[in-house]
Amino acid sequence: VCGIVGFYGPPKTKAVYDIISGLLSLQHRGQDSVGVVTFKEKFRMKKGLGTVSTVFKDENLEELPGCMGLGHVRYTTQGSNELINVQPFTVNYPFGLSMVHNGNVINFKHLRNYLYEEHHRLLETSNDLELLLYTFASEMEKHDLKNFNVDDVFSAVTETQKKVEGAYCTITMIANKGMLVFTDSYGIRPLVMGVKQTDEGPVYAFASESTCFDYLEYDLIRDIGPGEAIFIDTDLNVHERVCYKKQMNFCVFCYIYFAREDSVLHSRLVADCRVKLGKKLAKQIRSSGIKPDIIIDVPSSAYFFASGLSEELGIPYRRGIAKNNFIGRSFISPTQSEREKVVKNKLNPIRKIVSGKKVAVVDDSIVRGTTSRHIVQLLKKAGAEKVYFISAAPPIISPCIYGIDMASKNELIAANYSIDRIGEKIEADAIIYQSLSDMQELYKEVGLPICDACFSGNYPTGKSDEVFEQIEQERFSSRK
Ligand code: SF4
């Protein structure tokens, strides 16, 4: 995952201020790097490795003028964490294009060859944004550029969506023409549109999550659907088109882990979905025969699962683990030893609360199992009589090829061991997972078609061993 934003308003708008605030609210989606570009006669850009507040600490934002601009925070999946891979990317023909994206292209080898053979474009980076940018630029070139019109833009988007396979949302500035967004045909990754009315006219905004609009006081208009494109022209007219659409498959892991609890995706508050998933776990707990004294959460993404479960079972919820909020997220730290160090410094069980108790500890998911084992050990050291480990997500049995870094099947504990064996490995007195069918049923009830490929092995785009091998190789080399 990454976080992207785009703002476009009347001439007096200073887009950069909303871009920086927007990126701060999306910082949970990636902390490896940040980039901002604005447009006023030409593109002006600032990029750096690290978080928004470090990269923009001493920056004079007036040096990024313009009523239109884009921002990006990155979590590395494809391509190494070097400045050359930091978004946005620009290309000067046709018109001048600047683009950011969130997602993962799965046919990059094929596209790389296609762009070189057919359009004689050599990729400069190992970032798949280049594939999207150059494919779109090559499709735009085929039209009558002197008579720029919105139908040609949508036609170029359609051809790009047909050629670029995977999961992606993009925001693009077309110099002196407008702002364009488009998504992949399955709508796997989130992108929302908002607006703020000013005396000069509307300022339009696009962002990975709606939480950004709450801070900036924009009204959420809607989600961008599968295969859709929106173009805002220089008079701030909004043009919308469904270009190349297939059956929607929105990433369910976004609701479970990546999105912030205060975000609204597809008209559903993320926190509400987590409470509902927590309630679904009650059935499993009852049939397992375990009788916890208290329910605690691994802070902080598991809070709503734990509170839903506690409500359903009538067992008290307690905050049993304190968290140091000034240390990054362990799941998205690039190496195992970094992840372990992060967990050790980040979590501290509250002895008075857990000591002598049968504790059910709820986490959003179990990926490799090493973090889970560490949490069980911490709770036992703090005097817990029993520790039951509860995963709000079903077992993760297959890697994500759409931009979530769980590269290898070998790394996924549930792909390699039975549930009982996982319980032993993480040293828990019992282990309980969400049932896949209960989770699927919940999203069926709310009418949202989901991608659950990492839990079910059913990939909406289909899968080939070649794609898996390519992605694993890319990820391992970028980690090195
Ligand atoms: S495979 Fe899993 S993480 Fe990846 S898009 Fe699908 S649900 Fe999300």
Image (spheres, rainbow, N blue to C red):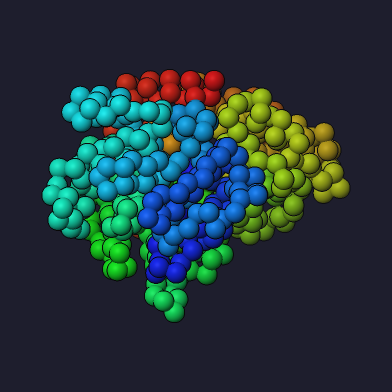
At x 53%, y 31%, the residue is 81
Note whether residue 95 is visible: yes
Outermost residue on the bottom side: it is 199
The image quarter containing residue 455 is: top left
At x 71%, y 30%, the residue is 341
At x 68%, y 47%, the residue is 299
Q: Is residue 342 above or below residue 271?
A: above
Q: Position of residue 379 (x, y in %)?
A: 77, 38
In front of the other: 464 or 396: 464
Query: Would residue 131 appear left or right of 255 to someone viewing this image?
Result: left
Tell how many labels.
Answer: 0
Query: Would residue 138 appear left or right of 276 to someone viewing this image?
Result: left
Q: Position of residue 251 (x, y in %)?
A: 41, 45
Note whether residue 191 is visible: no
Outermost residue on the right side: it is 352
Q: Is residue 398 above or below residue 328?
A: above
Query: Would residue 157 appear left or right of 388 to someone viewing this image?
Result: left
Q: Position of residue 452 (x, y in %)?
A: 40, 41
In front of the other: 362 or 325: 325
Outermost residue on the front side: it is 41
Q: Is residue 97 above or below residue 39?
A: above
Q: Position of residue 280 (x, y in %)?
A: 52, 52
In front of the other: 259 or 120: 120
At x 33%, y 41%, the residue is 91
Where, quadrant-wise, is the C terminus in this rendering?
top right
